[in-house]
Amino acid sequence: MKEIYKQIAKEHPDKLPAPFDEIYKLVGFEGLDALINFFGGTQVYIPVHKYLFADCIRKQVAKEHNGKNSRELSRKYNISKRTLSRYLYDAS
């Protein structure tokens, strides 16, 4: 049965509903099929990088901060100085 779906997706990718048409273009049928098998029937939220890696960035900022490089770190990690200060406060 899966082969039928694969054939249909390959021949008519434009007929897939959004956002699955874009996902199919990005990961192909095998990737889309894996996502369907794992998450099928559930709603999945995919955060932007900033939120996905927030905990890692918090730890890295605390590790790299030397008291004089706040501006550089805020640019490097694309966070405001205020956010950087909050991360440092939370780490202490």
Image (cartoon, helix red, strand yellow):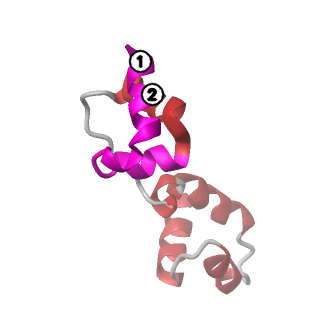
Q: Which residues are magenta?
A: 1-26
Position of residue 63 in the picture relative to residue 16 (left or right): right
Q: What number is the disc on residue 87?
A: none
Q: In the rendered view, tell whether residue 75 sits above or below residue 51.
A: below
Circle 2 residue: 6
Amino acid marked by disc 2: Lys
Does dot 1 land on a helix, a strand or a loop? helix
Residue 7 image offset from top left, x and y in percent: 44, 28
Q: Between 12 and 38, which is closer to the camera in this rendering?
A: 12
Judged from the image, the secondary structure of the residue bearing numbered disc 2 is helix
Membership of 22 in magenta stretch: yes
Q: Residue at x 50, y 63 (%)?
A: 50
Give the left or right position of residue 56, taking residue 9 as reference. Answer: right
Q: Quadrant of the C terminus?
A: bottom right
Residue 42 x/y as whole percent: 26, 32
Q: Which residue is mark 1?
A: 2
Residue found 47% across the figure and 81% down from its top:
82
* Label 1 environment density (alpha carbons within 10 Å; few <14, some 14–19, many ≥20): few
Residue at mark 2 to residue at mark 1: CA–CA distance: 6 Å
